[in-house]
Image (cartoon, coloured by chain):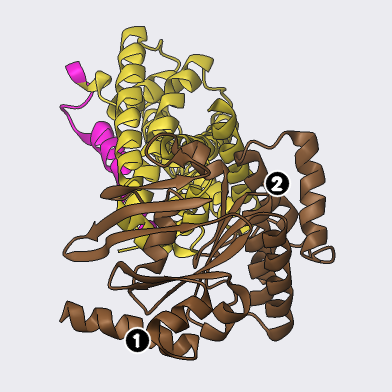
Amino acid sequence: MIEVRNLKKQFGAVAALRDVSFHAPDGAITGLLGANGAGKSTTLRTICGVLKPDSGQVLVDGISSAGDPLALQRRVGGLLDHAGLYARLTPRETFTFSGRLNGIPSQRLRQRVEETIAILGMQSIADRPTGGFSQGERMKTALGRALIHAPRNLLLDEPTSGLDIPSVRSLRALLQRTRDAGACILFSSHVLEEVQALCDRVVILAGGRVVAEGTPPELCELAGVTSLEDAFVAFTSAEEVAAC
Amino acid sequence: MLNQIAIVALKEWIDGWRDRRAVISAALYSLMGPGVVGMVSLAVHIGRDSQAVLIAMMSVFTLVSAFVGGMNVAMDSIAGERERRSLVPLLMHPITRLDLLLGKWLAVAAFSAAGLAFNLAGFALLFHRLPPLALALCLTPLCLLAAALEIWISTLCRGLKEAHTYLSMLVFLPMMVGMFMVFSPVAGHGWWKFVPVAGHQLQLDAGMRGKPLDPLSMLFLGLGTATLAGMALLAAADRLEQDDVVYGG
């Protein structure tokens, strides 16, 4: 479970996060919705320990980022918008490197690498350097790297961006299986249809603040509209008016 | 902690070794010195004086080879990570940024030492004389310093092109110091032998001429070089903690 409490983050004159608080429970996919610059990526990077908040707290399975950041990172896997790979390493080597850094013992790691390759259907490309991969193959490799240590908490930032339809469908199926196995998935996207199809709960960010959260039907009811898109517009417009 | 440093170092070493163009380029730079000095030796009569000049030339090329050997790996290891957007996924792993840097530094230092060894092997063939073992010990900290400076500069750069520009400038440091030590009338006196790079050049020159190495100078050079390398690594680690490294600003 991920809990974010009163997170604030400033980059120079820009307040990226003004006061972000929400929680993402286990066994659910929580969607993080927001326009460009709303603070989605900053929130995800802060949760996974890549950025340090100016104030506020991140708790993952009860572990605080301020108390034991490395223990927190062991419990989180992520595919953020930076899906960069090592062009001269194969997916198998990439997964092994990531698994070793996550402290998986050698024998278990070999087994886990094979499992990950099988789950992602990467048998035919597992021993090819990633340099010549298509966008879909690159995304699968990055996802495998995020999943290698079987994290209980998964952060995904626009994971379907650039993927073809079959890859999107297989990714969605994988996320649903992972959720059903009890993982906490925090998922950021611009695509409202995708959020509606996948997410159990939605957190809407605007101007570095949480402006609404709940299940998609709850948000629609709260905004007095019938679609998630209309609810999103209603909540983010209200924040923009307040900011003006 | 040590295990994680070794994991990063091994990955960087494998990744760097597979970059064949960079490896060949570093090897050619390392052999450039023996090649140039060899050609000069063909053009001049090898008397006692001219051999001294050739050894002085050699020492400059050898200092440069310690910096060039790991340059491509250093460039790729932080600036390259930022450019290919693999730095954020790497920072998401449970490893401290200092450990991450130390792993990368060790890999760069290994390439730097390989470049230096390649260069010395070339000169050993040219002069039909093996450099003394003590000289190799004296030069090892120089590889650590070169690697630390290169890693630090790499953390300051947003991409490979920028890193290449600045690291190429860094190579001028041993070149200029070496030339100064060869041609300046004030060089070689007093405290110069305790100054990193300059002192290494003097030890190198002495070692290849068959003169005894100065143990006090070697000790101070080792300590001074290790201190500078540590400072560069701390600066690099501090830089890696800053937000704009993640955001690429």
Give x and y (percent) for residue A172: 68, 73
Q: Secondary structure at mark 1?
A: helix
Residue beneath label 1, please?
A234
Residue A112's place in the image compared with B125, above or below, is below
Is most of the magenta stretch helix, strand or loop? helix
Residue B144 makes an appearance in the image: yes
Residue name at image x 22 percent, y 64 percent: A15
- Chain A shade in the render: brown
Given residues B1 and B126, the one toward you in this image is B1
Residue name at image x 35 percent, y 62 percent: B247
Q: Determine crowd level at label 1: few under 14, some 14-19, many 20+ residues with C-alpha closer than 10 A.
A: some
Q: Which residue type does callout 1 highlight?
A: Ala
Circle 1 or circle 2, nearest the eye: 1
Magenta segment: B162-191
Given residues B130 and A130, the one toward you in this image is A130
Image marks 1 and 2: residues in contact by CB distance under 8 Å: no
Q: CA distance from mark 1 to mark 2?
A: 46 Å
Image quarter where the C terminus of chain B lies is bottom left
Residue beneath label 2, please?
A96
